[in-house]
Image (cartoon, coloured by chain):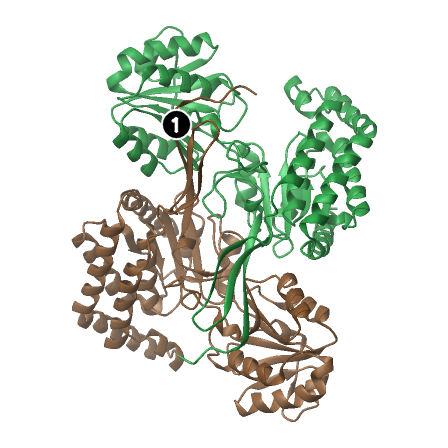
Chain colours: A green, B brown
């Protein structure tokens, strides 16, 4: 049974390679036409997609899934229109494939260029939301990659319907249907087979909670990119404008609590603690945030005493850990120890402090006087985002189309042979 | 005992992190001064280095190491001078750290830049040659990384002496000695501990044979970069200039046989086989190359019949696999199946064939009418090279200083909060 599953995953990966070998030759015109075809097909076949989704919703209710999960699982006319529009947006973005990254004519006349090329076969492992199926398929296609999608079993009917529509549209546009394939989703082992299919799969991107991502990274022999775990800090420096600090802390924490760029920890310099600790406590509590504070914060009414675990917790809820630090150095060390390398912010009016913080803090994004909420592919001008990488290899921060590519050195010569050393 | 070793490796990684945190703040001026200090120290203390090396050579002889390995292990005045000069070359290269990769002022006024930053703690696992110890230490330092070096036990005395000299020079230059550390080399387990020290080590680069590299990649939970396995092909197209083809094949195969960019396989289009097969057979045999040929080649005197394994063999010797193919398509498919993604070359006068080959062949370097021997960091203008990556993630092809860096998004604002969606 498990071996059957492995064979299934490997066979899908081999079909994906054949598709990828064809896709690498597709011009931007062809890929964009396919994206528009896919968008039109999603709109035209929305009824069958919504019907399939209804089955998932019913099963989900029967299985007692909580309302917030059911909400993420639910498709509506408007959400289908949203993912269709997303594909059209991707069609409008520049093609990363073929971009010349570096190039020169060498002293010997060899014409050398480093160009972007597709990765090849890209796997995605993700949780409930079926819209990720369409987003991932679109970004993979535009960047010239064949996609192996491993969604959640709770979204099986929805994903199956969506992928069937996308595959039909690909064929109609003259591209192989196997540019997009859905992998079996009932057995955890299909993830294992995907992430150990070295040589068959070029990259796997897990999107989901820390548990999924750690499991993937620990077991994988295929290259992976860690995404989306954000224990983000806001550090309020001794020289902060406290009005600004209050508004940045509130925005970072409360704009959307379920996203990886939300702040989970607040660090306040001791020099402003006397004024700022009561002030921010009140402001956060007015916004219904529960504070898990160190001794200084815990002196305030309604603040819960923090445990050691709080400094490492990604709450994704209306909770924040809060601590007074003696210096910028202590803040930097605290972040190095507890941060997840996602987004870290300092609020300060002092140029030297800002320079120190941005130079020393090791994270995908480091902000001065700005909310952690700004870390976002669309905001950064990428047009679309497949996830936010928190690793240092290959891609760091929001991943757009370029981050789904590799590169290749191409040289044209005229019989160039290399002299013996 | 094994746990002791793990503790040793982890302790070294933690010291490396402390050093890296200091090194990230070092300006180019400071790093270049340290590189010059290191070069001077190697020259000044050459006698003690050569003395240590003599011990390795004696042990190697006693252990019955073959002459070519002993030769790679041996240091001389000239070789010490060579690595010292190498450090000075690295000092002369631009600092990759701080380079702005992208940047703009967003519509809301947020000033956004993506800049290169060091990886942090970089591990190197390599085989006999002690000069790699110095090269790797120099490149890591310039790119702002603390290096954990795991060399071969056969070079233990040499590496210990070299690292002692480098560490003294670092301290003299005001940088932490722990920017360069040598790991225990007697037990294979030290490699295992290094490549599973996730969170402590940011990147491990194995340099050596396919066995070492596969073992590292299979077991690692730390990000790795595969380097240097080259089953490179030269494909002689139907429209090749056969004089050019002969010289490119000879140069690709015989310039240096022990290097990863040497050609290991020859593919000849059927249309030119009648003329070219006898001609290249003679030319290769005159250069003392043994041909492992398909049926067509095996009709020539002195050609050994190829077995299935030959198409996948990286000989690193005066041997070449040779085959006649019916079309460019067959050549591309053969390369996709048997190539290692290093360097592939086509010899052709036909623009369409050249465009097809460069677009379809998936390798770090793809050349038209040029020898595979050109794949080299110095030739590509990188100034120095830490290895040649054959993977698609992060770095592909020769890796210079830039490839030892990650990136970081830095944004400066003035109280920028993000509106709710």
Count how many numbered circles sit on residues in the image: 1
Where B257 sits versus B398, above or below? below
Return the residue at label 1. Answer: B413
Q: Is residue A393 left or right of residue A84?
A: left
Front position in the image: B206 or A240: A240
Where is residue B377, by image quadrant? bottom left
Image spot of residue B88 (x, y percent): 26, 63
Front position in the image: B319 or A89: A89
Q: Is residue B61 left or right of residue A215?
A: left
Q: Quadrant of the C terminus of chain A?
A: bottom left
Q: Is residue A370 left or right of residue A329?
A: right
Mark 1, Cα crowd under 10 Å, few <14 / some 14-19 / many 20+, is some
Q: Residue at x 34, y 12 (%)?
A: A298
Q: Note whether residue B194 is visible.
A: yes
Q: Secondary structure at mark 1?
A: strand
Image spot of residue A141 (x, y percent): 67, 45
Q: Note whether residue A181 is visible.
A: no
Q: Is residue A261 left or right of residue B293?
A: left
Chain name for mark 1? B
Q: Residue at x 66, y 29 (%)?
A: A128
Where A223 sits versus B398, above or below? above
Where B24 sits versus B169, above or below? above
Image spot of residue A171 (x, y percent): 80, 47
Front position in the image: A278 or A409: A409
Image spot of residue B350 (x, y percent): 66, 73
Front position in the image: B101 or A77: B101
């Amino acid at each position: 049974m498990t071996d059957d599953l492995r064979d299934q995953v490997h066979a899908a990966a081999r079909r994906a390679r054949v598709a990828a070998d064809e896709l690498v030759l597709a011009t931007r015109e062809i890929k964009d036409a396919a994206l528009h075809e896919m968008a039109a097909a999603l709109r035209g076949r929305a009824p069958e997609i919504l019907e399939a989704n209804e089955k998932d919703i019913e099963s989900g209710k029967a299985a007692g899934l909580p309302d917030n999960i059911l909400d993420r699982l639910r498709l509506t006319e408007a959400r289908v229109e949203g993912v269709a529009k997303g594909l059209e947006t991707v069609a409008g973005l520049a093609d990363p494939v073929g971009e010349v990254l570096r190039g020169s004519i060498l002293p010997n006349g060899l014409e050398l260029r480093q160009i972007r090329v597709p990765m090849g076969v890209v796997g995605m492992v993700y949780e409930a939301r079926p819209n990720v199926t369409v987003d991932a398929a679109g970004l993979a296609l535009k960047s010239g990659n064949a996609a192996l999608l491993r969604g959640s079993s709770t979204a099986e009917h929805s994903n199956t319907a969506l992928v069937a529509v996308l595959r039909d549209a690909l064929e109609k546009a003259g591209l192989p249907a196997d540019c997009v394939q859905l992998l079996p989703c009932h057995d955890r082992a299909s993830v294992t087979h995907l992430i150990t299919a070295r040589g068959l799969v070029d990259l796997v991107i897990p999107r989901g909670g820390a548990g999924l991502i750690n499991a993937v990274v620990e077991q994988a022999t295929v290259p992976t990119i860690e995404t989306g775990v954000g224990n983000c800090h806001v550090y309020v420096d001794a020289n902060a404008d406290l009005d600004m600090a209050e508004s940045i802390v509130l925005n970072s924490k409360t704009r959307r609590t379920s996203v990886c760029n939300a702040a989970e920890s607040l660090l306040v310099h001791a020099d402003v603690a006397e004024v700022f600790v009561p002030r921010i406590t009140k402001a956060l509590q007015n916004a219904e945030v529960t504070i898990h504070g160190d001794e200084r914060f815990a002196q305030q009414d309604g603040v819960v005493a923090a445990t050691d675990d709080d400094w490492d917790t990604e709450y994704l809820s209306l909770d924040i850990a809060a601590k007074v630090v003696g210096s910028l150095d202590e803040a930097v060390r605290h972040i190095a120890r507890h941060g997840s390398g996602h987004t870290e912010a300092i609020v300060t009016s002092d140029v030297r402090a800002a320079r120190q913080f941005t130079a020393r803090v090791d994270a995908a994004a480091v902000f001065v006087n700005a909310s952690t909420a700004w870390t976002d592919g669309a905001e950064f001008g990428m047009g679309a985002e497949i996830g936010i990488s928190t690793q240092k290899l290959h891609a760091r921060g929001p991943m757009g189309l370029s981050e789904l590519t590799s590169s290749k050195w191409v040289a044209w010569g005229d019989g160039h042979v290399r002299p013996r050393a």
